[in-house]
Image (spheres, rainbow, N blue to C red):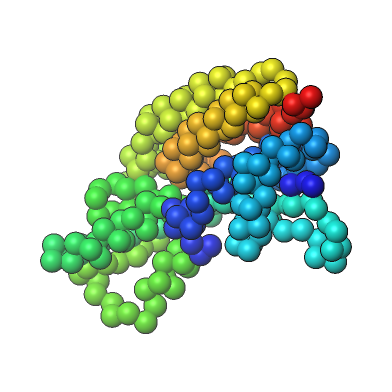
């Protein structure tokens, strides 16, 4: 037996139970640069242990959710793989490498709003949408992104337009401001780097010995939970800007590379599992 949205990350995560999230994260551990994750050639010891800990039931749940798949043309196929949706979900809702590699057309998009205080729920809903989608804010009611706004325009299409409450603009600086000045003013990279430094401390605490007992397997799983929480805490703060806009000293790319290696090493430990 092997393992191998339109929703925001927060909404997607709310649909999956913590135990199931744990399994989804483990599926990243046997991977080629986190691109096609699967568990292959696992020992009977691990499979027995995984079954006893309910992971096979969780695999069925993930398959029904479209986050896992297996070859339906082979009735006896026992190898589960992450779908692309499952891989992105396990990464925290976005693929960092794809985000950094995207091209930027040099145009900033601004969302400017002044929603009346009597509509607090609508105002907070808009702010939450902007924050969850990586917008930075220059002021509480002036939010900015380097990306086109098709999704937001689609959300607003058909509604009554009131430019006194909300306006969406495409703009370029025209009075000497640099793009780096805008980035520094819109996103708190000092706080973001602190979250990445905390994550780097977590991966340094990864168990390093072969997994040969239930106790050692449980210890590795506990580290996995800590690793996942630390990663999500960091990446959820990160706008994952195009590389051309990343400020000096930004730790995101370095941390990503360290994570790829850390999960690959953890996968090797997992495949060494043998209760003997």
* Image quarter of the C terminus: top right
Could you tell me which residue is drawn at 58 percent across and 25 percent down?
Answer: 219
Q: Nearer the viewer, residue 257 or 93?
A: 93
Where residue 203 appears, as percent x and y from the top left, is 57, 24
Q: In the image, 271: left or right of 186?
A: right
Where residue 220 appears, as percent x and y from the top left, is 61, 27
Q: In the image, 261: left or right of 117?
A: right
Q: In the image, 237: left or right of 219?
A: left
Q: Does 157 sit above or below residue 151?
A: below
**Taking the image as drawn, is residue 35 in sight?**
yes
Q: How many marks?
A: 0
Where residue 127 appears, as percent x and y from the top left, is 30, 56
Q: Nearer the viewer, residue 273 or 24?
A: 273
Where residue 223 appears, as percent x and y from the top left, is 55, 28
**Taking the image as drawn, is residue 9 in sight?**
no
Q: In the image, 43: left or right of 216?
A: right
Could you tell me which residue is drawn at 65 percent across and 27 percent down?
Answer: 214
Could you tell me which residue is drawn at 31 percent across and 61 percent down?
Answer: 126
Could you tell me which residue is drawn at 42 percent across and 33 percent down?
Answer: 192
Q: Nearer the viewer, residue 193 or 246?
A: 193
Q: Nearer the viewer, residue 159 or 202?
A: 202
Q: Does 196 sit above or below residue 66?
A: above
Q: Does 105 sit above or below residue 181?
A: below
Q: Residue 264: which quarter of the image?
A: top right
């Amino acid at each position: 037996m092997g393992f191998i949205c339109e929703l925001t990350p927060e909404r997607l995560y709310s649909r999956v139970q913590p135990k199931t999230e744990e399994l989804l994260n483990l599926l990243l551990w046997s991977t080629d640069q986190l691109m096609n994750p699967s568990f292959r050639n696992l020992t009977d010891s691990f499979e027995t242990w995984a079954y006893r800990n309910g992971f096979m039931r969780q695999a069925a749940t993930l398959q029904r959710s479209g986050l896992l798949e297996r070859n339906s043309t082979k009735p006896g196929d026992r190898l589960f793989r992450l779908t692309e949706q499952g891989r992105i979900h396990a990464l925290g809702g976005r693929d960092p490498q794809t985000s950094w590699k995207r091209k930027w057309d040099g145009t900033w998009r601004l969302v400017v709003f002044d929603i009346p205080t009597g509509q607090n729920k609508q105002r907070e809903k808009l702010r939450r949408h902007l924050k969850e989608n990586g917008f930075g804010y220059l002021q509480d009611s002036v939010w900015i992104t380097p990306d086109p706004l098709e999704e937001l325009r689609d959300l607003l299409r058909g509604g009554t337009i009131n430019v006194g409450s909300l306006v969406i603009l495409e703009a370029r600086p025209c009075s000497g401001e640099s793009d780096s000045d805008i980035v520094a003013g819109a996103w708190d990279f000092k706080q973001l780097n602190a979250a990445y430094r905390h994550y780097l401390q977590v991966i340094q605490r990864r168990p390093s010995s072969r997994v040969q007992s239930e106790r050692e397997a449980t210890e590795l799983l506990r580290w996995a939970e800590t690793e996942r929480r630390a990663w999500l805490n960091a990446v959820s703060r990160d706008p994952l800007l195009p590389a051309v806009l990343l400020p000096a000293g930004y730790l995101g790319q370095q941390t990503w590379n360290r994570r790829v290696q850390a999960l690959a090493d953890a996968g090797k430990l997992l495949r060494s599992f043998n209760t003997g």
